[in-house]
Image (cartoon, rainbow, N blue to C red):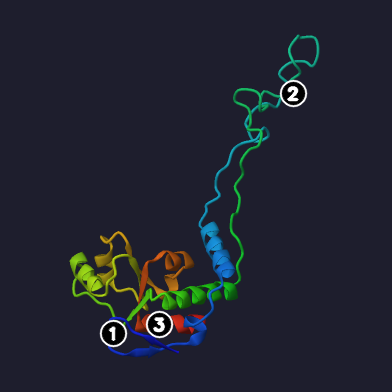
């Protein structure tokens, strides 16, 4: 298929398997959930009665004191005792194989093309790391909130984007499904298109 370059001067020929793939909502949902789950730390931890220091001795004899039976001062019902259902570190990651992940990325890109949210330019450069220069260039392309994808990270472009709260610059190897789904528009250079096709085709 051929994809119109918005803001460019010609058309670019792209792989149908990458940019004309049917959208599969269950697949994309599963990959997005997996990506977000992988970002969870899962490091919360509390001490149960066996992990709290002390309490190795029975505080008083079993019978004859008038007190209730007690085997340790670290019982959960005692002050300073362990937690009854103590939280433990856990792994929240959800496994998704490589073919599914790549398929979801291709499905998202294809849907962006169908919704005319994918903007392709020959290249995107700024002479200096100035926010104003990048804002003017994006204004010409009618982009206020979006994701800029290039094959290689350009220092001036990255620095110029940092003061734009809803504009993010990434390279192809940094692409993720959450950023693609959440972006109003995705601006991609022709070099990035080539790299994406080599990755996903």
Q: CA distance from mark 2 to mark 3?
A: 68 Å
Q: Nearer the viewer, residue 21 or 44?
A: 21
Q: Are marks 3 and 1 in contact (CB under 8 Å)?
A: no
**Neighbour tally class for label 3: few under 14, some 14-19, many 20 plus, Cα within 10 Å:** many
Q: Could you say where residue 92 lies in the image, as x and y percent from the top left?
A: 59, 55
189 on left or right of 55: left
Q: CA distance from mark 3 to mark 1?
A: 14 Å
Among the two numbered marks 2 and 3 on one chain, the one whose residue lies closer to the N terminus: 2
The numbered mark, 2 or 1, whose residue comes first in the sequence reads 1
Q: Do labels 2 and 1 touch, CB within 8 Å? A: no
Q: Is residue 86 above or below residue 155?
A: above
Along the line of sight, which residue is nearer the eye, 123 or 74? 123
Relative height, residue 95 to residue 75 (above, below): below
From the image, which quarter does the N terminus lie in? bottom left
Q: Position of residue 132 (x, y in %)?
A: 18, 66
Tell me: residue 38, above or below residue 55: below
Task: Name the residue: 55% across, 50% down.
Answer: 42
Q: Which residue is mark 2?
A: 71
Q: Which mark is residue 17?
A: none
Q: Nearer the viewer, mark 3 or mark 1?
A: 1
Give me the residue at 34% from left, 67% from top: 146
Residues 155 and 176: in front is 176
According to the image, label 1 marks what residue? Answer: 8
Q: Give the residue furthest to the front.
A: 115
Disc 3: which residue: 193
Total numbered labels: 3
Q: Secondary structure at mark 2?
A: loop
Say if residue 168 shows up in the picture: no
């Amino acid at each position: 298929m051929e994809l119109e370059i918005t803001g460019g001067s010609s058309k670019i020929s792209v792989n149908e398997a990458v940019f004309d793939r049917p959208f599969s909502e269950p697949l994309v949902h599963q990959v997005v959930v997996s990506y977000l789950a992988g970002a969870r730390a899962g490091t919360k931890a509390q001490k149960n009665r066996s992990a709290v220091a002390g309490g190795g001795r029975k505080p008083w004899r079993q019978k004859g004191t008038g007190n209730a039976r007690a085997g340790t001062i670290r019982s959960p019902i005692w002050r300073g005792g362990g937690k009854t259902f103590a939280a433990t570190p856990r792994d929240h990651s959800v496994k998704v194989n490589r073919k599914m992940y790549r398929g979801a990325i291709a499905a998202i890109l294809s849907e962006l093309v169908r919704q005319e949210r994918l903007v392709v330019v020959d290249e995107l450069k700024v002479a200096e790391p100035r926010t104003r220069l990048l804002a003017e260039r994006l204004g010409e392309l009618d982009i206020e909130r979006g994701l800029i994808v290039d094959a290689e990270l350009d220092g001036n472009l990255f620095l110029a984007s940092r003061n734009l709260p809803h504009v993010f610059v990434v390279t192809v190897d940094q692409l993720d499904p959450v950023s693609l789904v959440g972006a109003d528009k995705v601006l991609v250079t022709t070099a990035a298109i080539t790299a994406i096709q080599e990755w996903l085709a």
